[in-house]
Image (cartoon, grey):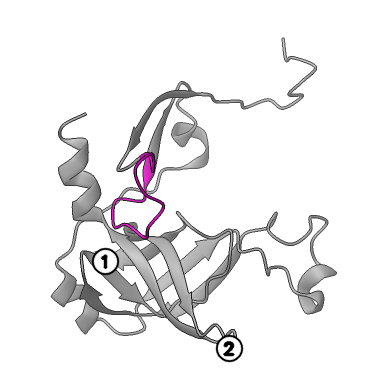
Amino acid sequence: MLSQKYPYEDIAEAEEVYYGTDFKESKELSPNDWAILKINQPLGRKYGYLGWKSIPSATLVRNEKDFFFVGYSGDFPTEKYQKYFSAGPGWTASYEAGCSIVGEEDGFLLHDCATAAGSSGSPIVGVIGGDPYIVALNNAEAKNLKTGQDIINYAVKISTIEEASRGN
């Protein structure tokens, strides 16, 4: 029987949480700003599963405009698209094709996908051998404080998550 609190058919709760940092010591931008939840229901069997692949940074950079981004940015849907959605900004996933990983710096991947507040943790996806895989997780964006213009975006490397999760 479904609870009154969650009147949905498929509910999953976090069984375990793996994370790179808990930010007790610092609130600084970190390539360890990630978390993975292990849920107590096999929802992937019903809805599908999107795995990840650790790919060398140089390979990612060479594949310009080959990635796509899906996230819950606080600036989507815009007024232009709001007529198609019943949920407000930040409650509807947006999609952008043709993104690039443009480099690596200080343990981060740098990317040009359109992001905004709320999209942290969103996947950057590449199609490899005909199948989609998460190749990085959006971390943060750098903006020009005077103009508000995006400068660059940061992403967590999958290898960073894999290395840290071996200890969990």
Q: Earlier in the sequence, mark 2 or mark 1?
A: 1
**Residue at x 46% of width, y 21% of height:** 40
Q: Residue at x 62, y 59 (%)?
A: 93
Asked whether 141 or 16 is in front, the reply is 141
- Would you say residue 131 is visible in this rendering? no
User: Which residue, given by chain and number where applicable, does mark 1 sit on?
Assistant: 108
- The kind of secondary structure the magenta stretch mainly shows is loop
Residue 39: give its label: none
Image vertical order of residue 153 relative to residue 71, above or below: below
Please identify the residue farthest to the top as the structure is shown: 1
Looking at numbered disc 2 in the image, what kind of residue is underneath it? Lys
Residue at (47% x, 57% y) in the render: 122
Report x, y in % for residue 125.
38, 64
Would residue 132 be found to the left or right of residue 59 on screen?
Answer: right
Most extreme residue toward the front is 25
Pointer 2: what residue?
A: 146
State the image quarter where residue 64 is shown. bottom left
Q: Is residue 74 above or below residue 113?
A: above
Residue 16 appears in which quarter of the rendering?
top left
Q: Which residues are magenta?
A: 22-35
Q: Quadrant of the N terminus?
A: top right
106 left or right of 94? left
